[in-house]
Amino acid sequence: MKNHTSSFISGAIGAFILNALLFGALFQFPAQSKFVMERLFPSKSVIEAPVAAGGTVTSVVKSANPAVVSVIITKDVPILEQVNNQRMDPFGGLFGNLPFRFFNTPQYRQKGTEKKEVGGGSGFIISTDGYIVTNHHVIQDNTAEYTIFMNDGKKYPAKVIASDETIDVALLKIDAKDIPFLAFGDSDKLELGQTVIAIGNALAEFRNTVSVGVVSGLLRSITAGNGAGKSEKLDGVIQTDAAINPGNSGGPLLDLNGNVIGVNVAVANGVENIAFALPANVVKSAVESIKTNGRVIRPYLGVRYVPVTKALQETNRLSVDYGVLVVRGEKTEELAVIPGSPADKADIVENDIILELDDQKIDDERTLPMLLQKKSVGDRVKLRVLHKGMEKDVFATLEERPSTIK
């Protein structure tokens, strides 16, 4: 598996040292286009209920379209008026009949504010009472207001219930009842070449645009930028050749059963037909965490590391070419093992190589973040560790990532 540099449908900045203090890594998202969680789910939420679909593209689109929405971003922007500032022309005597004259220098001053649409993204409804999934980067501006436009032309003000930057997932709520919704499928069962359908607010102008493609790759690892100077690493994402454009962020990637198997998140810069989606199982887990806890809770191991590659093995004469090498960060305070963390309690130390997690080999197809994101807080995991040339098994009980760790 290659590490691709992508964008949230924006720019991209590479990052090398991974941080398992998070989920195991950072997630990448597609950007908004143009310029650029209240109470938990009520018990009647039905995100598992299947949507009717006939197995063809047209029947899936017809069934799913009413549950796909556009997220419109509006902000108070300043109203500027021009004022003239007269200044004496020092050359008046040379270029006119008068010894001196004035010339005008245009200047502007603010005269109140007005609401304007500044961008947009996509989303989809996951319950009959108005809960909506989108990307974090679509609604990351705390000073903006968000409006949901339905496929039938209705619009509702949206409230942000919860948002998680690390995995680029957000949950919105509108005041609506008995509305169409989509169900999550099982993204672990996806196969290469499987037909998929993307629906979204392309370019934040063309609402409910449909494109069709196939699953081009699985378990991809990409680094993407959100257009705001930040970049994050996403592991285990789905690659597709379905056309995805700015504004598609947060929209569903559907299978031919009409189920959501991914959430559109990024495209590769400078090329065509390479786009990425967050796996539905990751998004579903985040939604369930919000439902139970009011926020996304991620398991945390507490180590900083770099992947062991063939080049790293040869340069440092390591005995293995897989796993992750526990190392400190660039700054003095960025310790290799966080004191008091699950890794610390399991006696993992700097320069250890973590080879396996629960008997699954850690490599470029099954990264440590990918394996961790399938676990829950409180899970006891077995780690195969190479310590001073000797392999050993240690056990760690995963904890919630502290809010102080970014």
Image (spheres, rainbow, N blue to C red):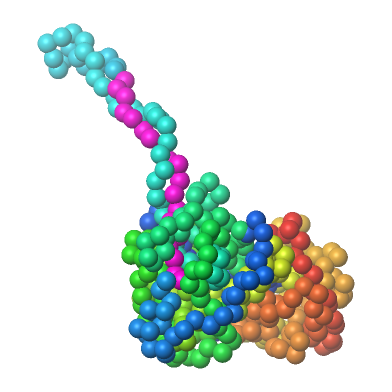
Whether residue 76 is in magenta: the answer is yes
Asked if residue 73 lies left or right of residue 142, the reply is left
Asked if 20 appears above or below 110 in the picture, the reply is below
Identify the residue at the far front of this view.
178
| Residue 237 visible here | no
**Magenta residues, start to end:** 67-85
Residue at 35 percent of width and 71 percent of height: 209
Asked if residue 63 lies left or right of residue 361, the reply is left
> Which quadrant holds residue 91?
top left
Identify the residue at the far top of this view.
99
Tally the numbered discs: 0
Where residue 89 appears, as percent x and y from the top left, is 24, 16
Where residue 297 appears, as percent x and y from the top left, is 71, 67
Where residue 406 appears, as percent x and y from the top left, is 68, 59
Residue at 46 percent of width and 59 percent of height: 148
Asked if 86 appears above or below 272 in the picture, the reply is above
Residue at 38 percent of width and 56 percent of height: 34
Identify the residue at the far left of this view.
97
Q: Nearer the viewer, residue 75 or 150?
A: 150
Asked if 161 appears above or below 308 in the picture, the reply is above
Where residue 192 appears, as percent x and y from the top left, is 48, 90
